Amino acid sequence: MFIPEVSEGESLSSWMYRIALQGMCNRYFDASHIGEFEAGEMWAHATHSSVSDPDFMETNVKLSSFIKQHGVARERLAEKFGPCEQPLVPIKYRRSYCYACLEEGLKTTRSFVCKLEWRYLLQPFCAAHQVLLRDAPVKYSTNEDYGFRLFMWHHNRDRVFDRYDLACEADSELLRLSLDVQQRYMDLRLRAPHSDVAQQMDNFMLTLMRAMLLPCLSASYRNVDMSGCGGPDCFPKHGLSFYVTFYFEVYRVSCSARARALYLSGLLLGWIEPSDAQAARGRDYYRVTDRAQIWRTIEINSQLGRWVHNQLELYESSLLSLSNIGV
Amino acid sequence: MCKKMMLTYLFPVYLTTSIRVSLPRSFESRQVTLCFVGSARTGQILTYSSSFGYPGVDLYQRALLALRAQESGKCSWPSTINPMVSQFSGVMPVEPDFSTRYPDPDQLCASLNWRYKRKLNLIDEQVFKNRLLRCFFDWGCDELALINDPYRISLEALFRILSATVTRMNHTR
């Protein structure tokens, strides 16, 4: 039986759906296949269905029946779809995509290929095409046919994309700087001596982005990040709970907002020169352009400043530490 | 011969979350008050209890009951804390009093009573609180998969968050 090759960077759910589309397992979406589960499996299916993430082997509830049907060795799958070491957007909040990647997938495989890297929290830009990822509505996030939904949505909502393109054009300098930050961080991450250090670095960078998304720095974000295609639910409930906002906001903000958080993190880390930031400011007069300004804004509330320092201190490593951000 | 008794002091830490929890089979949701009972010797959390928004529940006593049930083997708890539990023979009770004070949301406090504030002398209170807040709110993949609205979560999600909090507190720095 012919099983299509996995495209580069393709997610497990996307690959399994492509196989299902080719009619190789017609009952992929058929509820009756649940009757074929053994007692133990059935229980596992029932209890873990709510926490399933179809992009990973451990949490994909359809994987065991898939392996039974196609006789694919689990080890072979594990080679291609191993555990991910980068922080990810949870499956319920995934909505980013790169249209150029979708197009390429259509040309080469004649079906919709979704990449796992679209879910990487620290990469709001497509590494292959160097463009800011686009955002679809979050209601499609758990759909089996995620790629198809993205494609349909992309071609149905012209007005939103006009606005997206306008925003990208107006912010082209800022986006270029934050893309530089992303690439520089990825290069630095590759130099980590082992995975523990890489994980510490990810957590440090994620905490930095969380701090940059705090309400006190919201003047550095455009309105388009907070309404419209950037996501209407980005900043609706500030003040309701500081901790939930601090930890959770990064998962559901738009890619544009994450790119700006990355830009501010780059300023803090000294990876963006204040002169470059000034030059990129354009007519966005409220945008922060130097490190001291960020710390001043955060430390107006001394408790908040202490909290941010404590959080960053936890994830210090040899390659990224508080000394890098001028503390 | 008099056997020297070694006391392990237990301390409660209360947390009223700003997150609302949906009650099962109901459209109602409530802010829950949680009581974590920790060992002052090791800083590990031994047990916890929750009022699910009902006032007048003695959270500390409820948590101690759970601890005793766990010690006597009537209740299944992680085996890692069993040896520690068997060593404690004295407690330092701090009686909660909801009539005098209801705790502020997301503010950890060692006592619910204004007039009777115990200091946690044996561990660094501030460090402990910061760790607990981080462990409670920094949700992992399993918890995130259960959460649609982070400001209003299900009971199942709360239980998962609580057990993950205890695991993270006891097994990470």
Image: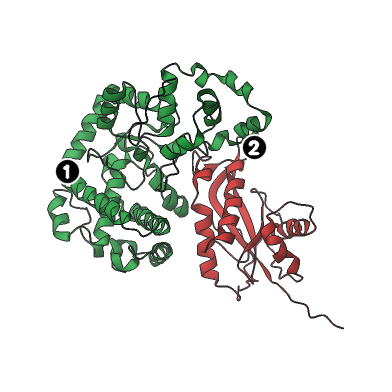
Q: Residues within 10 Å of mark 1 (few under 14, many from 20)?
A: some
Q: In the picture, one chain is red; tell me its letter.
A: B
What x and y, as percent, mark residue A148?
36, 23
Which of the labelled discs sits on residue B24, or is there none?
2
Instruction: Determine the secondary structure under disc 1.
Output: helix
The colouring scheme, among rainbow, by chain, secondary structure or one colour, is: by chain
The disc numbered 1 marks a residue on which chain? A
Amino acid at dot 2: Pro
Q: In the picture, one chain is green; tell me its letter.
A: A
| Up/down of A85 relative to A72, above or below | below
Q: Nearer the viewer, mark 1 or mark 2?
A: 1
What x and y, as percent, mark residue A123?
31, 45
Residue A261, visible in the rendered structure: yes
The disc numbered 2 marks a residue on which chain? B
The total number of labels drawn is 2
Amino acid at dot 1: Ser
Q: Are marks 1 and 2 in contact (CB under 8 Å)?
A: no
Tags 1 and 2 both on a single chain: no
Which of the labelled discs sits on residue A172, or is there none?
1
- Give whichever of B130, A97 is nearer the camera: A97
What residue is rendered at 39% in x and 59% in y? A197
Q: Residues within 10 Å of mark 2 (few under 14, many from 20)?
A: few
Which of the labelled discs sits on residue A252, or is there none?
none
Residue extending farthest to the right is: B1
What x and y, as percent, mark residue B112?
63, 63
What x and y, as percent, mark residue B145?
51, 40
Distance CA(mark 1)–CA(mark 2): 49 Å
What residue is rendered at 65% in x and 34% in y? B25
